[in-house]
Amino acid sequence: VPQLTDAAPEWIDRALAENLNGTVQYEQLHINGNLDVTARDVIVRDAEGRTVAALDGLTVGWTIPRLAAYLLTDREALSVIDRIELDAPTVYMREEADRSWNINTLIKEKDTQTPFSLRAKIAVNDGRAELTFQDEPPLSLQSIQALVDLAEYPQVTGDVRLAHASGSLHARGSYTSADDFALQAEGDRTPLMLAMRVLPQDIPLQIMAGEAREWTADVSRREGVLSYRVKGRLEDGALTYDDTYHVADLTGDVEVDPRQVSFWRTKLTVNEQPLEAQGRVLLQADPALDVDVRTTGVEANRLAAIPLQGKVAGNVHIGGTTTDLAADGALMMADGRWEDTPISRAFARFTYRSGVVRIADAVTG
């Protein structure tokens, strides 16, 4: 053991130099009877000297057979490791201007043909992560418990539990490549702002506030085909779509898959008009609608380009697509105006197609 203790710093420094764009500082180094190497008070800095991580302890487990294979072949020093334990780590993740993360460049890209050789289990105990974004408020994650298994690399499996200011999250899955992965996750209260991180960039949707509660997600990609199903309840949501529809006070149950978004028991205001809704939106180039809406009093001309003034109440089915809306239903109005025609105590059934409104069964007076 004394000889190993003397040799350990040199071995550790070599392994870090081979793989890290930055430096690692530690105060104590200890080797126990199982030959596990433990460093205390570890600080990881990037190539510019900024702190990327700080750990109370870092334990590296290794085996004699792995050491012998390393000494007798051209494998990387990392191939000796069979277990890594991170004790109370804090990671500082910063989003750069190009939307990449500071930790992306921490690991060296190598020109050598020697394959990545770390085949260890990595455990995180009581970790923290401090995330700083370009355009959103910072996010703090606590109580991180994680296990990542590289034994079958390039397939990586993991299980992570963590907490944040408003709730907790559990995720588990496997990753081999961008075209071969599977993830299952659930949480009790999660900010909807995080959804903007995974939505396609070409969707003209901007989320400003709200939470997803008691949600589950199952996402995978096999042979280039993406499959996902997300289900949960929205609370206090606020968003805009295409700078035309401004949604606030959104609550309701929702389920999303590659074909459609379904929702029920939904209450919201659209352009400050209160509505209740249920239905689905088919996710295609021009999204198709199949939505039932109930209202007790809205200014209809705040929701559609129609020459109607005054509050209406009733039930409406909305169909068609976002660029070619269709609707039919029954509406009531106490007092209002259609273009220059006054309306008083009116009831009517109507249809709306291609910008044309047709009235049937109208009763006034």
Image (cartoon, rainbow, N blue to C red):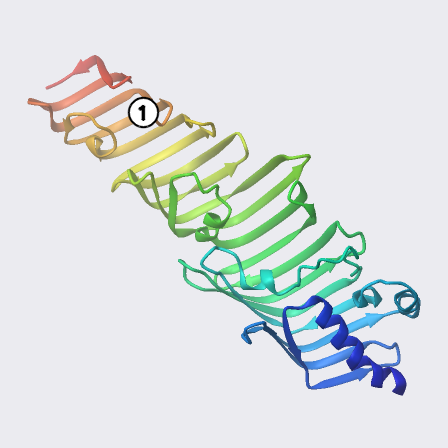
The quadrant in which the N terminus is found is bottom right
Q: Which residue is mark 1?
A: 316
Please tell me in which quadrant of the rendered image residue 41 appears. bottom right
Can you give x and y, in whole percent of width and height, for residue 18 in the image? Answer: 73, 68
Secondary element under disc 1, as helix, strand or loop, is strand
> What amino acid type is highlighted by mark number 1?
Val
Q: Nearer the viewer, residue 66 or 73?
A: 73
Q: Nearer the viewer, residue 185 or 5?
A: 5
Q: Residue at x 41, y 32 (%)?
A: 278
315 lies above or below 201:
above
Q: Nearer the viewer, residue 143 or 296?
A: 143
Please tell me in which quadrant of the rendered image residue 292 appears. top left
* 221 with respect to 30 (left or right): left
Q: Residue at x 70, y 59 (%)?
A: 110
Q: Nearer the viewer, residue 352 or 46?
A: 46
143 lies above or below 352:
below
Query: Which residue extends farthest front?
Result: 111
Please tell me in which quadrant of the rendered image residue 304 appears. top left
* 153 with respect to 42 (left or right): right
Q: Residue at x 48, y 55 (%)?
A: 99
Q: Residue at x 73, y 52 (%)?
A: 156
Local packing at callout 1 (Cα closer than 10 Å; few below 14, some 14-19, many 20+) is many
